């Protein structure tokens, strides 16, 4: 090759090929970082067939190699990648700031430190406060002050009932009893189990100023106050405020006049019978699923607010009446839609009864019969069905794991506790059988709200380890946490603004961000869905070029785009579950 032009052309082509190869390799990490004693794994991904045999951990300040190891086996193709490896550096425990190098890829810089999760649970409370209905502290204004008029109840339809308060469910402004009760329970449990994770910087309504009560309890009380309004008498309980007529376009929350009665919105009574679902009827079969969630939240609230005797006693009374309401007609209460077929199609209820009866024994009346009932219900749903089915409809098995097993395990003898923990183990193993086939240890299905399932599954793994003392699934648990914060094919955190300097959602399906450029700090977005699901959803239109186009695949998609309500919409209840998980992680060192 004596021709100088040919040499230049050859070098140009060679450099282009090298740049292409380098640009087709990535290392995915947990952007929050890792605690020193935790499982620490990153994932090397390539779109080519390159193999690697080792990796290095580099001190970002000095540039020195501080740890190196073999990369282990190739996990082969996954999603958009042709080859993947798990890079395990758990043996390295020194705090500091580092990055990983493998093949031609270099990871983002990350920390190893005991405090990488410090303050994160409080951070996510920002989103809950921003979702407050009635008085909204972020806007310093009130909304939906005319909620609402009754439907399906024993009173005449359109009777006014005070249902002001609670949280907007997601980026729409509906309010659901089932998600509110579940979110409230998670906030209460987070404080009960990890009180040191929370501080006091806000007043009871979310405005700045300390009030002597941890902010997580202020927010939980916001949920409890709303639930009390939805259960005003022993014989009255309501399931939902507003419906999908809300979905007329993005707007900042205000006085919505879509329902035919000025600014009033409908409030749907729990009658245990099918109610509207678009052109059809939903599959409501009873009163148990929602009412039992009320009972559990009230019971735990009565314990944690015992320094407020009147409020605590009210919650005790309401927990008993809610439990009785759950027994009126065994079955599920699904939500209502008027325009579209999409609802929260909950299909299980015995897990809710298990949690409720276990909570009664622990916090309300020390009666062994409650434990007997809880044990009976525990055998009706030993494993949450999505874990072995690897699929589910939208919110079909809610709240995504069986919370009752954990609560009941603390109240029973060793033999029964071992049974309950075996149920947890069986479910975890069902997921692990799928997870161990890929480098991300991904065994949670890509159904709608997959991040909510991921969060709850990590919690189940934590609870199993806590109650058994076993570490069998520590790596699997950590992989699910890591997934939420960037160790996923897209390399992005699924939590708005967390970490502050990381790759996180910037264009979520939210009126706050889309219309006003308001931040929605701490909001957990829905997460990736199967590509087959995405292609069949109604009304999705991306608003701009896909920033993650090269990481989409026939397996799953995620879009940081306000037009994608299926993957990039934050949810109130998912964020509440994440607050529990982050509080738990902050307790690890």
Image: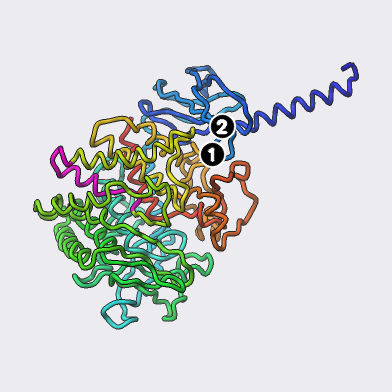
Q: Is residue 302 above or below residue 388?
A: below
Question: Does the rendering let one see residue 122?
Answer: no
Image coordinates for residue 475, horizontal then vertical, percent? 38, 31
Image coordinates for residue 378, horizontal then vertical, percent? 22, 49
Q: Is residue 34 magenta?
A: no
Return the residue at label 2.
45
Quick one: SS at disc 1?
loop
How far apart in space, not on screen, are marks 2 and 1 (Cα)?
Answer: 8 Å
The label shown at residue 260 is none
The residue that appears at 59% across and 41% down in the rendered structure is 551
Q: Which residues are magenta?
A: 399-416
Return the residue at label 1.
489
Q: Is residue 401 magenta?
A: yes
- Nearest the camera: 30 or 556? 556
Q: Is residue 270 left or right of residue 565?
A: left
- Nearest the camera: 537 or 309? 537
Please rate how many residues cluster around mark 1, counting C-alpha atoms within 10 Å: few if below 14, some from 14 to 19, many from 20. Answer: many
The residue that appears at 48% across and 68% down in the rendered structure is 340
The quadrant where residue 236 appears? bottom left
Q: Is residue 427 left or right of residue 107?
A: left
**Residue closest to the far left:** 367
Mark 2 or mark 1, which has the lower sequence index? 2
Q: Is residue 575 left or right of residue 233?
A: right
């Amino acid at each position: 090759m004596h021709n100088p032009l040919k040499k230049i052309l050859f070098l140009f082509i060679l450099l282009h090929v090298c740049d292409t190869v380098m640009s087709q390799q990535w290392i995915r990490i947990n952007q929050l970082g890792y605690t020193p004693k935790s499982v620490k794994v990153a994932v090397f991904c390539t779109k080519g067939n390159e193999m690697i045999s080792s990796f290095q951990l580099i001190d970002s300040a000095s540039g020195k190699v501080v740890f190196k190891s073999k990369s282990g086996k190739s996990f082969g193709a996954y999603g958009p990648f042709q080859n993947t490896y798990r890079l395990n550096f758990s043996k390295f425990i020194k705090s500091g700031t580092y990055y990983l190098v493998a093949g031609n890829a270099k990871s983002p810089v990350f920390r190893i430190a005991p405090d990488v999760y410090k303050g994160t649970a409080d951070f996510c409370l920002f989103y809950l406060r921003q979702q407050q209905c009635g008085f909204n502290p972020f806007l310093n204004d009130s909304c939906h002050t005319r909620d609402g008029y009754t439907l399906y109840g024993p009173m005449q339809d359109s009777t006014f009932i005070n249902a002001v308060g609670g949280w907007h469910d997601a980026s729409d402004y509906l309010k659901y009893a089932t998600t509110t009760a579940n979110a409230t329970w998670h906030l209460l449990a987070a404080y009960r189990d990890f009180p040191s994770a929370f501080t006091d910087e806000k007043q009871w309504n979310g405005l700045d100023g300390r009030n002597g009560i941890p902010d997580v309890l202020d927010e939980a009380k916001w949920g409890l106050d709303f639930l009390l309004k939805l259960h005003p008498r022993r014989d009255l309980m309501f399931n939902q405020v507003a419906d999908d007529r809300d979905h007329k376009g993005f707007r900042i929350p205000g006085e919505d006049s879509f329902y035919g009665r000025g600014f009033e919105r409908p409030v749907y009574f729990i009658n245990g019978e099918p109610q509207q679902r678009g052109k059809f009827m939903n599959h409501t079969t009873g009163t148990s699923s929602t009412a039992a969630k009320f009972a559990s939240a009230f019971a735990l609230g009565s314990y944690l607010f015992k320094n407020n005797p009147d409020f605590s006693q009210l919650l005790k009374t309401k927990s008993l009446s809610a439990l009785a309401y759950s027994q009126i007609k065994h079955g599920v209460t699904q939500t209502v839609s008027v325009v579209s077929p999409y609802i929260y199609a909950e299909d299980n209820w015995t897990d809710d009864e298990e949690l409720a009866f276990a909570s009664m024994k622990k916090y309300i009346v020390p009666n062994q019969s409650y434990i007997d009932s809880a044990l009976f219900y525990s055998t009706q749903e030993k494993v949450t069905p999505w874990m072995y089915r690897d699929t589910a409809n939208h919110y079909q098995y809610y709240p995504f794991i069986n919370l009752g097993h954990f609560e009941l395990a603390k109240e029973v003898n060793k033999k029964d506790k071992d049974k309950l923990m075996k149920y947890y183990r069986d479910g975890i193993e069902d997921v692990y059988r799928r997870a161990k086939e890929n480098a991300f240890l991904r065994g949670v299905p890509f159904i709608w709200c997959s991040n909510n399932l991921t969060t709850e599954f990590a919690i189940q793994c934590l609870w199993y380890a806590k109650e058994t003392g076993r570490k069998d699934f520590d790596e699997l648990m950590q992989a699910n946490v890591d997934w939420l914060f960037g160790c996923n094919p897209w390399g992005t955190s699924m939590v708005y603004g967390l970490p502050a300097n990381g790759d996180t959602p910037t264009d979520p399906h939210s009126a706050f961000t889309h219309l006003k450029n308001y931040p929605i700090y701490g909001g957990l977005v829905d997460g990736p869905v199967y590509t087959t699901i995405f292609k069949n959803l109604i009304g999705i239109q991306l608003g701009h070029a896909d920033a993650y186009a090269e990481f989409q695949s026939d397996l799953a998609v995620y879009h940081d785009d306000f037009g994608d309500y299926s993957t990039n919409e934050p949810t109130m209840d998912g964020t509440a579950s994440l607050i529990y998980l982050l509080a738990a992680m902050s307790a690890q060192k």
